[in-house]
Image (spheres, rainbow, N blue to C red):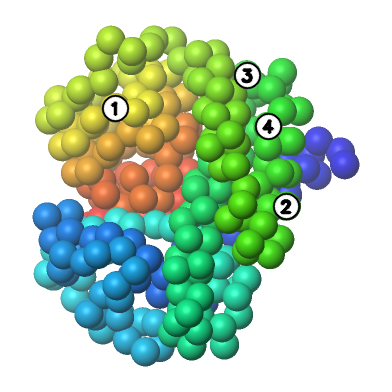
Amino acid sequence: MPIQDKQNDYLNLLNDLKIDCTNCSGLCCVALYCSKVDGFPENKEASIPCQHLQSNFQCDMHQDLSRKNMKGCMTYECFGAGQKVTQMYGLDHTWQTHPQQRQHIFETFLVVFQLHQMLWYLIQASTLDACAKFKQEIARLIEEATTLTTKKPYTLLSYDIDHYRNQVNKILKCIIEQISKSSNNQNNMYLGKNFKGKNLDHQDFSMSLLIAANLENCSLRGTNFLSADLRDANFKNTDLRESLFLTQMQINSAKGNHNTLLPSYLTQPCTWL
């Protein structure tokens, strides 16, 4: 396949990695552990349905999440794993209708979530000109994950996802070293730090704690935010279109406004005014 056609396929694949609750069987509201401290309605053990999940898999307080400050629910993003696993089993074969298989379904959801998250990062890496020498390996890893998620669930549960993750982490680390002008190995604690108006182009903020940091009106071209904690980080009046490895979950947890510019594959949260 020509490189350009493959790249177009990858960008189209990003759409499949976006959350679609209308075609999901409420898996995140059941399979995951939740805590009130993290902005969820209740303390809930994994595999127990949230009390607000209705029989049609919709949330009975969805319209009130912002008013009730349910940040956990508002920021969560499954990278499309919910609708993917629901499709795998079929809406007539859910954790509700087949309770004897519920744990199997939940475990499949957790595996697909991890695969989709890594796919998100690999697809973004594939768009970087500086990573030309890694294109073949990135393409192989993308193909492996996309093929896996078309197979039967039992195949996924027997897959060595730790081995796959190690391969992905290794190549992402090499890429970050190439694209970043500085390393964050010595300091990744930026809680509440005021960066307002600074030029942070090509900085490496991977795995950093940027909770409540002020990044308003910063220059962030080529800035790497892979797995950074951006809860309540301020991106008001900031251009993020050329920032790297951002996810919808990170954007959902941050603060912005109508002047915040996002990459085309991300959506501005409704809470940003």
Front residue of this view, candidates 140 and 48: 48
Task: Judge from the rendering whether residue 84 lies leftward or rightward of residue 187; answer left or right.
Answer: right
Three-letter amino acid code of the residue under disc 1:
Ser
How many C-alpha atoms fall within 10 Å of the one at disc 1: few (<14), some, or many (≥20)? many
On the image, the x and y values in percent for residue 127 come to 63, 33
The answer to the question of whether label 2 and label 3 lie on touching residues, with beta carbons closer than 8 A, is no
Task: Answer with mark 1 or mark 2, whichever residue precedes in sequence.
Answer: 2
Task: Answer with mark 4 or mark 2, whichever residue precedes in sequence.
Answer: 4
Front residue of this view, candidates 147 and 80: 147
Q: Indicate the secondary structure of the residue bearing disc 3.
A: helix
On the image, the x and y values in percent for residue 153 come to 62, 64
Distance from the alpha carbon under mark 3 to that under mark 4: 13 Å
Label placed on residue 130 = 3
Residue at mark 2:
147
Distance from the alpha carbon under mark 3 to that under mark 1: 23 Å
Residue at mark 4:
138
